[in-house]
Amino acid sequence: MIGRINHIAIAVPDVEKAALHWRDVLGADVSTVESLPEHGVRIVFVNAPNGKVELMEPLGETSPIAMFLQRNPDGGMHHICYEVSDITAACDHLTAKGARVLGNGTPKKGAHGNPVLFLHPKDFNGTLIELEEVR
Amino acid sequence: MIGRINHIAIAVPDVEKAALHWRDVLGADVSTVESLPEHGVRIVFVNAPNGKVELMEPLGETSPIAMFLQRNPDGGMHHICYEVSDITAACDHLTAKGARVLGNGTPKKGAHGNPVLFLHPKDFNGTLIELEEVR
């Protein structure tokens, strides 16, 4: 079911500062900053030949990563996103297998405009897994 | 400097159980278990078309991930590994930029037989970064 690794997300307290640091110290190829107010984050892509890391800073009072940064003020690895070809079929399969889909249990529009869902980290070894439909 | 994402490592308390779960629930392509006693881990690869996740269980009393699992008994995302073409040059550059290389500050032989180093997570937003030389 799961396909390509779409991205690995890292929460950071200051995305400009983090992007400059990754660029200057690691020699990383970093994008400009994008604000996604409807998703409560400001992000920078760290592009590698075979995938990307997303550095995410909380945006707004209801940011979904605000609590994570309260617990981890320096930041930290937040989630891994896999692509699936049919998110409705994936959701049905996962639910039938007993995995818990966060929120109301159905896919919603993600940061890249595609339908996404997040799986409960307790069901996957403490790892938050996002599935994104990429047709 | 950093090149391909070589793997994302997830610490788990029971690698057989985790592998079966990732296979059955996520439909993941998982390898058989490999024991790496000299590195203190038992691992399973979760193969995706563009990269891999390594599920790691502690092996032995001095496993480098034992403390992580004490703090996170369910497991969790442990590190991200990038490939570099020349680890000595990378190490020199990183040290000159003030980044801290864990251990004695020099590369050592990693789990795949290539020279590796780990960077202090405090220097990279709470994220443990491994660099592996792949020529």
Image: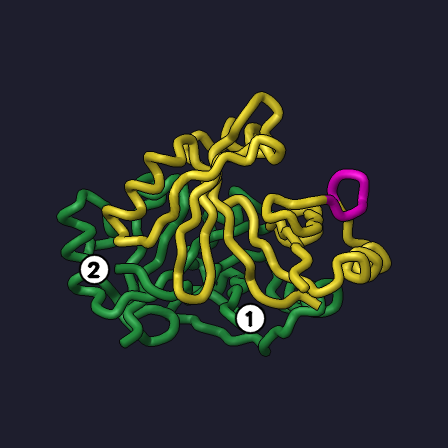
Chain colours: A green, B yellow
Q: Is residue A32 visible?
A: yes
Residue A9, how many percent across, how many down? 48, 59
Residue B32, how many percent across, how many down? 38, 42
Q: In this rendered view, identify the residue nearer to me: B46 or A118.
A: B46
The circle drawn on residue B7 is none
Q: CA distance from mark 1 to mark 2?
A: 28 Å
Q: State which mark lies toward you, 1 or 2.
A: 2
Judged by its main secondary structure, the magenta piece is loop
Residue at image location 43% in from the left, 36% down from the top: B12
Residue at image location 24% in from the left, 46% down from the top: B24
- Relative placement, left or right, of B131 versus A60 is right
- Which quadrant of the view contains residue B38? top right
Instruction: Please state the extent of the stretch shown in magenta in the rendering.
Output: B102-108
- Which quadrant of the view contains residue B111? top right
Residue A50, how many percent across, how many down? 51, 70
Sooner in the amino-acid sequence: mark 1 or mark 2: 1
Q: Under tag 2, what secondary structure?
A: helix
Q: Which residue is mark 1?
A: A44
Q: Which residue is mark 2?
A: A90
Q: In this rendered view, identify the residue nearer to me: A38 or A15.
A: A15
